[in-house]
Image (cartoon, rainbow, N blue to C red):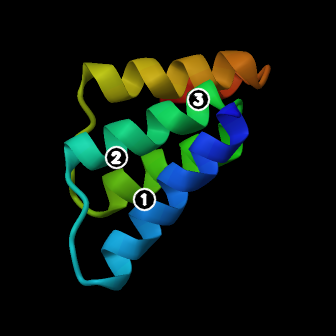
Amino acid sequence: EKGSRTDSALVLLAEMKGRGLEPNVITYNAAISACEKGCRTDAALDLFSEMKASGLQPDVIIYNAAISACEKGGRTDTALDL
């Protein structure tokens, strides 16, 4: 069930972008947190990078979710580089 919720969050984010809506920090937080809970480390890190590339500044909640995703994915070295 967690995987399907993660997929739903990613589909919703893609639909937003497809309709010309710009994701904000809260949107990215929800998507990255969904990836973290669904053990989708690569997707969480991709969103984290995308968010930073768009000019948005990650907040402590997003860093926490990204670091937790790294931990679940066994990528502690990546977590230290965030």
In the image: residue 7, left or right of residue 63 = right
Q: Residue at x 76, y 25 (%)?
A: 73
Q: Amino acid at mark 3?
A: Glu
- Which residue position holds label 3? 36
Q: Nearer the viewer, residue 5 or 14?
A: 5
In the image: residue 73, left or right of residue 81 = right
Splitting the image into 4 quarters, where does residue 2 fall?
top right
Q: Nearer the viewer, mark 1 or mark 3?
A: 3
Per the model, the C-alpha gap separating discs 1 and 2 is: 9 Å
Q: Amino acid at mark 2?
A: Tyr
* Place of residue 29 in the rendered image (x, y in percent of width and height, measured from the top left): 34, 37
- Tell me whether circle 1 and circle 2 mark residues in contact (CB < 8 Å): yes
Q: Residue at x 28, y 48 (%)?
A: 27
- Which residue position holds label 1? 50
Please tell me whether mark 1 sits on a helix, a strand or a loop.
helix
Task: Mark yes or no: residue 3 visible.
Answer: yes
**41 vs 53: above or below:** above
Splitting the image into 4 quarters, where does residue 61 fall?
top left
* Place of residue 25 in the rendered image (x, y in percent of width and height, measured from the top left): 22, 44
Q: Amino acid at mark 1?
A: Glu
Q: Of marks 1 and 3, which one's residue comes earlier in the chain? A: 3
In the image: residue 18, left or right of residue 14 = left
Q: Dot 3 surroundings within 10 Å: few (below 14), some, or many (20 or more)?
A: many
Task: Mark yes or no: residue 80 visible.
Answer: no
Q: Of marks 3 and 2, which one's residue comes earlier in the chain? A: 2
Q: Of marks 1 and 2, which one's residue comes earlier in the chain? A: 2
* Place of residue 53 in the rendered image (x, y in percent of width and height, measured from the top left): 35, 61
**77 vs 54: above or below:** above
